[in-house]
Image (tube, rainbow, N blue to C red):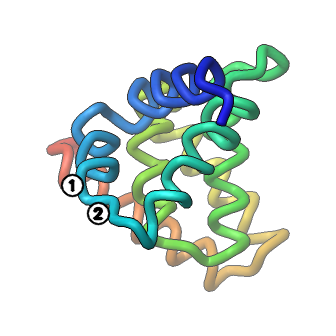
Amino acid sequence: MDKAMYDEGLAVRRAVLGAEHVDRAIATADDFNRPMQDLVIEYCWGAVWGRPGLPRKTRSLLNLAMLTALNRPQELKLHIRGALNNGVTKDEIMEVFLQTAIYCGAPAAISSFRSAREVFDDQGGG
């Protein structure tokens, strides 16, 4: 493991998803899933999210579209929260999901709109 890359990834993951979520994920990791946590922190959040080529806001918008295409509502909700943390507006989220309706299908986009509504309601900004 590259300790510097891991530390960078941990810092980025905490900034985007919130320290509470990240710390809980790490604290509840066990021998079975800890390697996956380490992999995600080092490579996803360190090696990719830590790159200077795209701003975090853009990376968040991409994630919302990709997670819609993959139909991953649980991860999508997490990344909607992260997108809001990265300065993405509700209107921008709406535009991403409208575009995914064309390229990924209406059912996928409708599910993503539903997930976003749940996140907005949880945050008191329905």
Could you tell me which residue is drawn at 62 percent across and 18 percent down?
4
How far is disc 1 from disc 2 in space, using C-alphas? Answer: 5 Å
Does 25 sit above or below residue 69? above
Residue type at mark 1: give it: Asp
* Image-quadrant location for residue 109: bottom right
Numbered-mark total = 2
Q: Is residue 122 left or right of residue 115?
A: left
Q: Horizontal and vertical percent for residue 90?
A: 45, 40
Q: Is disc 1 placed on a helix, strand or loop?
A: helix
**Which residue in the rendered view is the most extreme toward the bottom?**
107
Mark 1 nearby-residue class (10 Å; few <14, some 14–19, many ≥20): few
Could you tell me which residue is drawn at 84 percent across and 69 percent down?
103
Q: Is disc 2 placed on a helix, strand or loop?
A: helix
Q: Nearer the viewer, residue 1 or 71?
A: 1
Q: Nearer the viewer, residue 80 or 107?
A: 80
Pointer 1 residue: 121
- The image quadrant where one finds the N terminus is top right
* Image-quadrant location for residue 29: bottom left
Could you tell me which residue is drawn at 69 percent across and 41 percent down?
43
Q: Nearer the viewer, residue 124 or 11?
A: 11
Mark 2 nearby-residue class (10 Å; few <14, some 14–19, many ≥20): some
Q: Horizontal and vertical percent for residue 80?
A: 46, 48
Residues under numbered marks 1 and 2 in contact, where contact means CB atoms less than 8 Å apart: yes
Q: Horizontal and vertical percent for residue 76?
A: 50, 61
Q: Horizontal and vertical percent for residue 54?
A: 78, 22
Pointer 2 residue: 118
Residue type at mark 2: give it: Glu
Q: Which mark, residue 58?
A: none
